[in-house]
Structures are given as structure tokens and as C-alpha cells.
Amino acid sequence: MQRAASAFVTLFLMGLCILLAGPAFEMRAFGRSGSIDAGALPQAVVVVVAVLAILAFSSDAFDHFRGRAEGGSSTRGMTVLLIGGAVLLLLAGFLALWSRLAFPIAAAAFMTSTSLLIAPPETRNLRGYTTIVVVSVAFSLGVWLAFTYLLGVPLR
Amino acid sequence: MENLGLLGDAIFFELSNPLILALTLFGVVVGFTFGATPGLTATMGVALFVPLTFPLPADYAISMMIALYCGSMAGGAIPAILLNIPGTPSAVVTTIDGYPMARNGLAVRAYGWALISSVMGGLVAWVALVTIAPALARLALRLGPAEYAAVALLGMTIIATIIPGKLSKGLLAAAIGVGLSVVGLDQITGQGRWTFDTLALMRGIDIMPALIGLLVIPELLKSIFEKQGHASAPKSLKGMLPPIREWLGQLVNTLRSAAIGVATGIVPALGGSVGSLIAYDQARRFDRNRKQYGKGAPGGVVASEAANNGVTGGALIPLLTLGIPGDTVTAMLLGGLMIHGLQPGPRLFETSGDIVWNIMASVMFANLFIIVVGLIGFRFFVRVLDVPRHLLTPALFVLAVVGTYSLANQWFDVVIMLGLGTFGFAAMMAGIPVYPMVIGVILGPLLESELRRALVISGGDWTTFLTRPVSATILALTLAALVLPPVIRAIARRRGGLVPQVPKEYQE
Amino acid sequence: MIRHLNCIALAAAVALGPFAIGAASAQDFPTREVRWIIPWNPGGSNDIMARILQPILEEEGLPVVIENVPGGTGAIGMGQVATAAPDGYTVGQGTSSTMAIIAQGQAPLRDDQFTHIIRISIDPLILVVPGNSPHETLAEFIDHMRENPGEVTIATPGANNLNHIFAAMTARGAEVDYRHVPYPGGSRVVAELMGNQVEAGVLKPSETMEQIQAGDLRALGVFQEERLDVLPDVPTFADEGIDVFPYGPVVQMAYLDGPAGLDPEVRDTIASAFEAAMTSERFLAFAEENGFQVDPITGEELEAEIEAVSAAIAEVAGQVFEED
């Protein structure tokens, strides 16, 4: 699991480095008489991140090859990834919904669906579902009222 | 002497000001709640409560957040004792003797010990804070750009190397953080870097959205998988406070552990769990009943709790004097200070002296409130453990989103926060620590601009960092921080000796 | 005491909040605190000025919170103003320094991203050295520069701004090269001067008067045609035969900016509150003490003034920094 995540992060960082290398190397790195200019740090970051990302991934791969695999079962890692990923998707959905609908509606929808996703088996009954919906709606409304009218932050 | 007067004024100001005391008390209660709930951390507490402090003057707001920090350290002992689950990572060591005490029917007494030691640890740390911080700030005022650059480098190196896990991953994380800080306008020339000529990126990545994204989102995601325990409150609270004679017997242990906590707090990134492990180790070595340790010795609880509350005051010292956060909570506090227009660093004492002294006075009040809140609120905090996780976590996500938005009413901040949260989660899965990224974001700009300034002054001569005694010393320490930990580990392994290790599942 | 009252007011507002529901419109402005971005460090002259104005503005019915967003010669903070919603709840302190880097195309900002609200101050600039510096007079300092060509350091808050222009003009007067050290704000320059990290600095009297009076800093020369009332013994550069305006006069000023597209009604509300606060006795006394002028022009007059100064700076900077 860790190896897959490591590969993903390394690939992502490499892509980012390639994208950012252009603008970084357009800037001047060294000024007059040995002083350093605006371009030096971005250029260093691009190079260092690329090198370390490859290093980190190859060390993970090396560990795997040597049989020193990560501790913990891979199935647990899979669950964490799936549920964590799903919650992140729901969060993105919340933002997308919020830009179109009123805040309390979007927030309540997000809270209800997330609660349903992670609710433990013993709460999966009518009473449990009712609690989830009531809590979600009440909390979203409360936050909206508190921020808009008490803290002066209008949440559209 | 002058400092004593300033401190006295600040204490008197707070005593005559019910609102700041009420906010401090509120902070302690919230902190206890976050600390007592496994999976919720002080970092989250501060992040989620920063937006609520917007309308308040800076010192009121910061006092509340620091009170939250102190309270959470004390609250973490509750599930540690009752359920063998540390409420905060730094309460891990409290479980070693706290839980056995509870199983021997001494849960209430164990909690009493934890409470008293927390307060004592916090107060020792407070004394260290008010004596060391002003002196250190005055010293730091004499630092020039070369020294600042060296200090920033030292902070980043310590954090990247001390974080458990692979060195390459720690350094990678720090480099990513520095990269995040590049986005926006260059501090020195004002030219845009990685802005792609968009106004949104021109603003740069603000510290708070980055911190909430990198620290809070992955932690919240992790908390979904935290075990939820149900504890019933002990029926009688009788015998909570130990008799004075027993307590005097633990006095040396308390003071020593608190001092260890302060010292580990000052060093960036060591954090509460390491402080309490070292203190626990020392307590066992010096205690005549050392055989009892691990089976329910009060000394173990005392050492752990005194030390992890000592860390709070210790961690505030580099934050207020150098602008270097020692752990994730102080990183969040730094964001909070900046939102209220205070730039932490040696000049903070000059430009906003009264605010700094008020903050320090409320650290004392926060610690005094811990005992009151802990005694009265015990039953309530036990019940907090029963709040269903599947209802609580989504609500906290909503607060994280709303809080980020309200920082500057900027939609883009929320997008940045969520993007970094996703990245932070992926990094966590890949075993790349998140905290060095945070430090990179905070210290990267400091390191870069001071380095560039130092080179202008020296006329492009890099030896300036070695010929100036203070910066040379700091750089030598940096080298030591990079080289020593692996060496010590190797020696310890050869000797088969005991290196205190935090159990892996509780590592931050 | 005022803080205390604020808190009571705040508590009342919190308690009454839910009843104060109403749609925000230009007539109601302001219904909450206005964020006033000071794109410089806390403790610098702009910050000190803002904090003097804050309580007076509150009395004029315009509650403001001051937020320091330093860096990039003010461009970072002003960038936040430019990208904020044009509802009047975000304003920022524009200065000729930020104007200068915008005029030179150094920052991805344009003048038309802002609504200019009111001019706050006109500031002279002076050359200062540490109190324990061996150079007692301007002439001695110029001699020192001549004896150590390219090695004398002069610090300024920010780069490519008026302070930088005058630092370069000092070196030009000495006919040698120098080392320019930019810092993110005046208070840091003062600290570095007092710590003898740099040899001289170009600063405003408002951020140095306290240290000059205490003997921690020494003023050597004034970058202006006439001497200052607050520092009558300090000569102008012209007195010493050095021409710091070879391309025509340029002046350092500070003014209030909002994002482009600000409702004219909201703009006028803010401008009149500021004008009332700036012409209050308290603020005028503060201005006199610190040696800056108050000349609150608004509207088209302000637009024209900013355009003129902006053009002058662009012209001067183009010729000065070529050599730098």
C-alpha cells in the first residue's frame, strides 16, 4: 500500500517539477558579484524535490525487494485509502455544491453523506439514520447562522 | 526587574478584565474536550477556533488559543487512564502506568495525579517562559541576516531529521514546503514567481490555509479509523487528590520531569511524547519503587503529565522569540498570531510588548484553570468519549472548510486547503511526514530572504556565515543535528541499549 | 480603556447579532469592521500611523481592523487588496514605493486594479546612520563611501522604490558604487542599524524620530529641498552640494486604496470618515511631531496626482536602476 502511495506521490511531484522547471529557470539565479537573485530558490527546489522524490521511492522499492515490507496488513491500508479518498471526494463535492447552492444545503448534504459512509454497523437502523440527518441539518444551519450573523462572515 | 513589573501589570490587567479570563477558561474547556477525545488534537482545536477569534483583540484571541493548547495536554490523560488510549499523542506514556492504576481501582487517584502534575508542569514551564523568552528576544535582536538565515536552516534541519521515518522523506517534505512558499511575489524584488500571471496565485499560499490543509485534513481522515471506546465515569470522585505527604514525595520527580519537558519543548519537533518518555525513563531510574513502574506507579503518571505540560511552555519560547514553531500546535498558533497582525520574532517584544506580556500572563491563568476545569468537568469529559465519531468528524470537516473561507473570505483559500489536504493524505499514506512541509512553508521565506540579504552585505562572500561567530556556531549545531541522530542510534543499537521509542501507531 | 469598551461593544454585538439581520447595501455601509491592509511590518511608519488613526476612525463610525501583510515592497498586501471583493470591507495602504514597482512592471499588478480613495500623508526621507557610527556629518559619510568604493552598505525598506532611488542618489553623489540591502519594513532597518549590521539607511522621520532623540540613530541628511522642522540641524543634500533630484522632484506619499470597481457611495463614506479622522487635532499633532504633512485630497485630484508621481518615478527609476 505504502509503495503504491509512494509511487503516486513521486509521479505527481515529478510532473509538478517538470511543469514548474520552465518558469523557474527563466528567472535570474545570480545577481551581480555573487549575490543570489529571485530564481535561485525555485530552481533549487525543483532540482532537490525531483532528486529526493526519486530517492524516497527507490528506497521504498528497495525495502520491498529486500522483503522488509511495511508493517500492518495491506487490507487495512486499502480501507483507509478507499474511505479517505471517498471522504475527500465528498469534500470536493461539497465545495462544488456550495458554489451553486446555499451553504446550509450543501453542508447538510455533505455531512449526511459522510456520516452515512463512515457510520458503524450498530447505528445502521432507522433511529441511527434519523439522528444523522437531524444532526447534519441542525449543525449546518447553526454554523451558517453563527458565521453570517455573529462573526460577520457571509457564507453565501 | 523591569520584566517583573511588566508581568505584574499584565496579570493585574487580566484580573481586572473578566472577558479575557472567561476566554482563557473557555479555551481550557475546549482544549480538555479536544484532548480527551482520541483522534482530535490540539492542532485541530486551534485551527478550528481561530476564525471564531477574529472579532477579538489579538491578545484575547491568542490567550484563548494558548489556553486550548494547555488544556488539551491535560485532557489527554483522561482516555489514557480510563481506556488505555492516549487522547493526544503526548499522553502515550501516561497510559503505561495510568491504565494499570485504573485497573487496580485507582482510576480517580490516577487522574488526580495527572491533574496536579499537569498544572505543576505547566507552571514550571510558565516560569521558564517568562524568564527565558524576554532575555532570548533581547539577544536575538542583535542577530543580523546571516544569523537569521542560520537559525532558519537549523530549525528546518532539526525537524527534517528528528521526525521518525526515513531521512530522505523528511528532507523531501521540507523541500516541498519551501516550494509552496515560493509561489507568489518575491519578498525582495516583488517579482512574481510561479504565479502564471494569475492574481489568485500572486497572493501566494497563505500560511493558515496551508496549515489547515496539511495538518487538519489528514488528521481528521485518520481519526475516522480511531478506535472509539466507551468509558463509564467512576461513581465516586473521592480520593482524587493524593495526600500532601505522598505529593511531597513526588515533588522532585514533578520538577525534574517538568524541566525535561521544557527543554524538549524548546527544541523544535521533539514534541510532547518524546519529552514524557525521557522524563518517565528518568523517574524510573531515580525511584526506589522502580519495580512498580508499568504496573501502576503514580510516579510514572506524574513524570509523563508534568513533562508533556512542560513542553507547552517550552515550545512557546522559540515561537515568541524567534518565530520558529516547535510543534504542530505552535505552528498553528503562529498562523493565528499573523492573522491578528503580529509577526512572531524578536521584534514582537518591542512592537507589541503589552500584548506579549498579556499572552504570557494568560498562560499562567490557563494552568490555574486546568485544575478547576479538571475537577469540575471530569464527568463531562468522560461523557465526551461517547460522542459518536461518525457524527463528529463530518462536522469538523465543515468547520475546517468554513474556517478556511472566513480567514480572508477567499474561495481560492478553500481550494488550496483542500488540494493540500489531499496531497497531505497521499503523502501520509506514502510515509512522507507532513510536519516538515509546514515548517518549510513557515521558515522557507525567512531562510531565503535573510540568506540573500546576508550575501548582499558581504558582497557575495559566502564565508560570511563562517566568519561571524554566532552564525558559525548555529551552523555547527545544524551539522550536528544532521549527523548526530544516526550516529547515536547506531551506537545505541550496538550496545543493545534502550533508546526511548514512541510506539509506531502513535507517532505524529 | 478603549479596548475594554470595544470588548463590551463586541459582547453586545454578539448578543444582539441575530436580531440585526439585514441585506448589506451601500447605504448601510459599514455593517462590520473594515479590513485595513498595511503592506508593511508592524511597527513601521505606515503601521504606526494606522494605529493612531484606528480609534479616531472608530469614533467617526468606521471600525477598522489593521492587518499587516508585509513583503514585496508592499505588492503582496496590495495584491490582496486588488483581489478582494470590491465591497469596501477590504482597503489597503498604497504608497509611492508600491506605486514605483507597479510603474516599473516589477509586480504583476496594474494601477487600474485599484480605486484610489484618499491621500493620507506626504513623507520626507532622511539618511540615517547608527548612533555609534564614526561618521558625524554627511560630508564624512560621503568621504567614507569614496574611500571604500562598492563596499558601504545602505539599507532600505523594500527595493526599487523611492528609498532605493535615494540610496542610489547618495552613492551617485559620492561618485562610487555601494551595496544596497532591502528589508521587509522600516522597523527591521532600524533594528539592523542599531545592531550595526548595515552602515546607513534611508528612512522616514516618523519611523526614526524616537531613536534619533535617544541617540541610537543619527540623521545625516534630508532628501528634500528644504530642511525639516523636526530636525532643523540636519542639512539637506543640496546644502552639501549633492543633487538628489537630477530627474525632477519626486515625493513619497501614502494613500488609501480599495479594489477596482468600488461603489462610489461606499468610497465617499470611507473617504469622509478618513478625512475627518486625519484633520482631527490628535492626528495633526501626531503628524507635526513626526515630520510628515497631511494633505487629504480625493477623487480626480488624487487620481491625477498619483498618475503624475507614478510617471516621474518610472522615469527616474528607469535611469537610476540601469546603473545599479
Image (spheres, coloured by chain):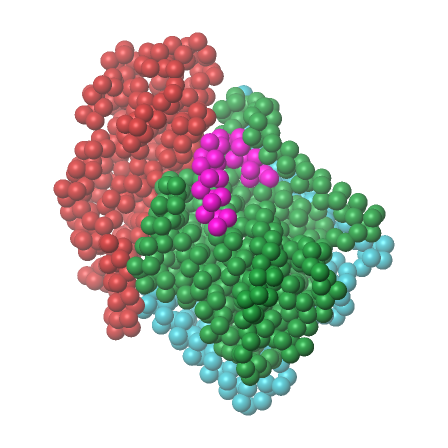
Chain colours: A cyan, B green, C red
Magenta segment, prevailing SS (helix, strand or loop): helix
> Residue visible at 40% across and 71% down?
A143
Residue B197 included in the magenta stretch of the image: no
Quarter holding residue C97: top left
| Closest to the observer, A34 or B284 | B284
Q: Please provide percent x and percent y for residue B99.
A: 66, 72
Quarter holding residue B106: bottom right
Residue B115: in sight, yes or no? yes
| Closest to the observer, C18 or B349 | B349
Quarter holding residue B429: bottom right
Q: Please provide percent x and percent y for residue B76.
A: 57, 67
In the displayed orientation, state which residue is furthest to the right. A66
On screen, residue B329 above or below B393: above
Range of residues picked out in magenta = B127-154
Residue A8: in sight, yes or no? no
- Quick one: quadrant of the N terminus of chain B? top left
Q: Please provide percent x and percent y for residue C40.
A: 37, 40
On screen, residue C120 above or below B364: above
In the visual, does B346 lie left or right of C23? right
> Residue visible at 29% across and 19% down?
C221
- Quick one: quadrant of the C terminus of chain B? bottom right
